[in-house]
Image (cartoon, helix red, strand yellow):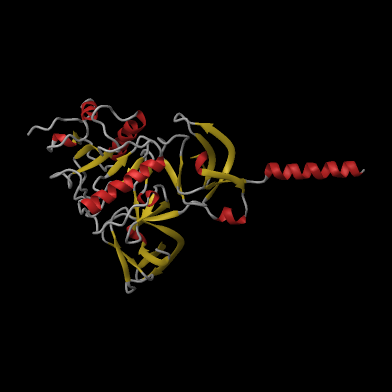
Amino acid sequence: MAALVLGSLLLITCAYMVHSEQCACAQGPVQARAGPSFQDHVVALLSDGNCLSYKDHDQIGSDGNVWANTDYNGQITWIPKSYVKIEPCNTDNLKKRADQCACTSTDSVHLRAGASLHAQTLATLTVHQCLTYKNNKHPADGYTWVNVDYHGQDAWIAENYVHIGACTTATHTNSSGVHSTVNLSGCPHIVTRSEWGARTPTHPLIHLPGIPKYFFIHHGASAPCHTKTDCIAKVRSAQAYHMDGRQYSDVGYSFLVGEDGNIYEGRGWDHVGGHTLNYNSVGLAVCFLGNFMDHVPNDAALNAVKQLIACGVANHKISSSYILHGHRDVGQTACPGTKLYELIQSWPHYIRHQA
C-alpha cells in the first residue's frame, strides 16, 4: 500500500511538472519576431525581465541561431534563445508582459502632467516618438487622455494624436526622457544608443527635413572589431573623437557596423548627421568599423548594411530612388577605403559622383 501511495504521489508530481507553464524571460532588451529569423518582422519588444509563455519548442533558424518559440497575446513569436532564460512561470514574471507603447502620429504633440488641456506641458513630442502606455485612459476637456510613463512620472497625451500598440521596435531614452524608434520592420539587429552606452548630445539633434535622397558609405580607418564587446568600445571611441576632438554635438554617423554583424545606432534614421560635407541634411551614412584600404569587410558586416538599406527603403526612411555614394565620391578623402569603395560600385543604386 505504501508503495502504491508513493507511486501515486510521484505520478501527481510529474504530471504537475509537465503541465506547469514555462516562461521565456528576457535577459536585457530583445525583440520577439514573427518567425525564427532576424529578417522576420518584429512583433513586440521585451525589456529586461519581461516574460512570454514558452511553447517548449526550439528551432534553428536560417541564420544559425537557436530560436525559442513563444506566445505573445495568442500570436506565435520567436526569440533568440541566448537572449532569454527559460524558467517556470510564477505570479511575478507572468505580470511582466511585453510593454504596450503610445507612439505619436504627428509632430508637436504636448505631453502633459495631467489629463487636461490646463495641465503643465512636460515636453513637446515629434512624430514616431514612443512612451510606455500605462493601460489607463481618462476623458476630460473634450479629449480622451492616454496615461504614459515619462521618466518614471505619470504623463498624459490626447488619444487622437497617438497610436497604441505593442512596442514593436527597440527603444532607448534620450536626454528628454522620450523613447526613439530605430529597429523597424525588416531591420537587421540594431544595437541602440542606450545599449552601447552613448553619451547625451551636447545640443539637441535636428530632424531631417525630408526623406533622405542619398546613402553614404564610410569606414573608420581604425582597427576592426569582431565581437559585440569590442565593437561597442569602437563605437564609444568614435563618439568621443567626434565630440571631444571635432567638437560635434554627437557621433556624426547615422549608423555604424562592426564585423560582429551588428548595426550600431548613431544619430539614427531621423536626424541630421555630421558625416558628409554638404549632404548631412539630405543623406544618411553608415561607417564600417575598420580599415578597408586593402581588403573588404566580412560578409556579416556587408549583409547587415545591405539589409539596413533595404529596411530603410521599405519603411520610408530612405528614398526608393536613393543614390549610393562612397565618401570619396563627394570629398577629398580615401574613405571608405579602396577595396570597399571598389566593392560598393557593384551595389544597387551606386552612382559615381560627377564633379
- Dividing the picture into quadrants, the one containing residue 235 is top left
Residue at the right extreme of this rendering:
1
- Dividing the picture into quadrants, the one containing residue 91 is bottom right
124 or 221: nearer the eye?
A: 221
For residue 267, say whether it is visible: no
Residue 183, x across and y down, in percent: 36, 44
Side of 276 relative to 184 (left or right) = left
* x 29%, y 43%: residue: 255
Residue at the left extreme of this rendering:
355
- In this rendering, the answer to whether 263 lies above or below 203 is above
Side of 281 relative to 132 (left or right) = left
Side of 6 relative to 328 (left or right) = right
89 or 296: nearer the eye?
A: 296
Q: How many marks?
A: 0
For residue 106, say whether it is visible: yes
Residue 273, x across and y down, in percent: 22, 48
* x 36%, y 31%: residue: 300
Residue 310, x across and y down, in percent: 30, 35
* x 39%, y 40%: residue: 189
Residue at the bottom extreme of this rendering:
118
119 or 138: nearer the eye?
A: 119
6 or 335: nearer the eye?
A: 335
Residue 37, x across and y down, in percent: 44, 34
Q: Quadrant of the N terminus?
A: top right
Q: Quadrant of the C terminus?
A: top left
